[in-house]
Image (tube, rainbow, N blue to C red):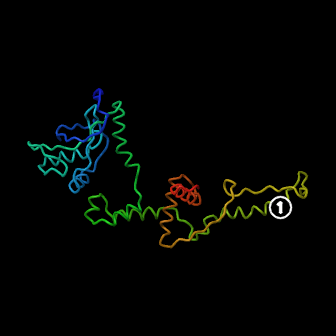
Amino acid sequence: MAPRKTPAASADAALRIEYLPLDQLSRWPGNPKEHAGGAIAASIARFGFRDPLAIDEASGRLIAGHGRLSVLERAHAAGQPAPQFVQVREDGMWLVPVTRGGSFGSEEEAAAYLVAHNRTSELGGWNDELLAGLLGGLDDDLRAVAGFDLDAFVREMDAQADSAPTLPEAPSEFLNDLIGVAAAAPQAQATPTPAAGGDAAPAGTPAQAAPVGPDSRDYVQVVYVVPASDRDLAQRAVKRAREQFGVATAPEAFMAIIRNYLRAQEVAA
């Protein structure tokens, strides 16, 4: 990579958008991100060029927008009309909105931002229920340009639900194993503990209590009944809570959901 240039004194003062000639924009060498060119082109054609490219002020190279740049270059070379928000110079060259004014302390830091700009979006994922509701309100054309096939998306959601661990049919069976251990505890306490010589312990000697549950906590069974139509939704919620909070059982996942909700409501959990 080229040596790092010293940024101008005002480079980091504020970000700004400038229109730069398409043929003067430089890519970051070795950019590892692949792009869905057709989907990007469809989005730009429908919505306009609303997301400016971004450059590292010190090197003058792109740190965000390589896929969009490629789409614009192909469209310009093919003689297509400039998309909305892209200006046309007198000689026909396109002027593209670019975010400027930001620089980094090193080439490595700029490269890390280039990766993070894409990776952080990937890591976020989707809320499937909210996404399905939003897509359901769009017509087929808008869903397509948004990059989703609703029917395929619903099939994928159903497949994920089918692969999730099946909860007991009866909600009252959620904690039966643990409750069975707890119910046995009083019997264990009532049984006299033999003394060292084999005789029963003297009256009044406390018996050893049997451990209750996997971590010696007391458990109580709480049953909430949901409509049959919401059973799959409840299963997905518990499965997601297990993954998100790193818990092993449905009861732990259920309590994690409750605590997370109470924290969101600013209620002490």
| Element at label 1 | loop
User: What kind of residue is marked 1?
Assistant: Thr
Q: Name the residue furthest left.
A: 91
Classed neighbour count for the residue bearing mark 1: other residues with Cα under 10 Å, few (<14), some (14–19), many (≥20): few
* Spot occupied by residue 198 in the image (x, y as percentages of width and height): 89, 54
* Spot occupied by residue 86 in the image (x, y as percentages of width and height): 18, 47
Q: Is residue 265 above or below residue 51?
A: below
* Spot occupied by residue 76 in the image (x, y as percentages of width and height): 14, 47
- Tell me if 46 is positioned left or right of 119 in this view: left
- At 51% from the left and 73% from the top, the residue drawn is 227
- At 8% from the left and 43% from the top, the residue drawn is 90
Q: How many marks?
A: 1
- Tell me if 96 is positioned left or right of 153 in this view: left
- At 80% from the left and 55% from the top, the residue drawn is 208
Residue 55: which quarter of the image?
A: top left
Check disc 1 and report the residue beneath it.
191
Q: Is residue 222 above or below residue 110?
A: below
The quadrant of the picture occupied by the C terminus is bottom right
* Spot occupied by residue 204 in the image (x, y as percentages of width and height): 88, 57
Task: Please tell me which residue lies in front, 58 or 210.
Answer: 58
Q: Is residue 56 above or below residue 245?
A: above
The quadrant of the picture occupied by the N terminus is top left
Residue 2: which quarter of the image?
A: top left
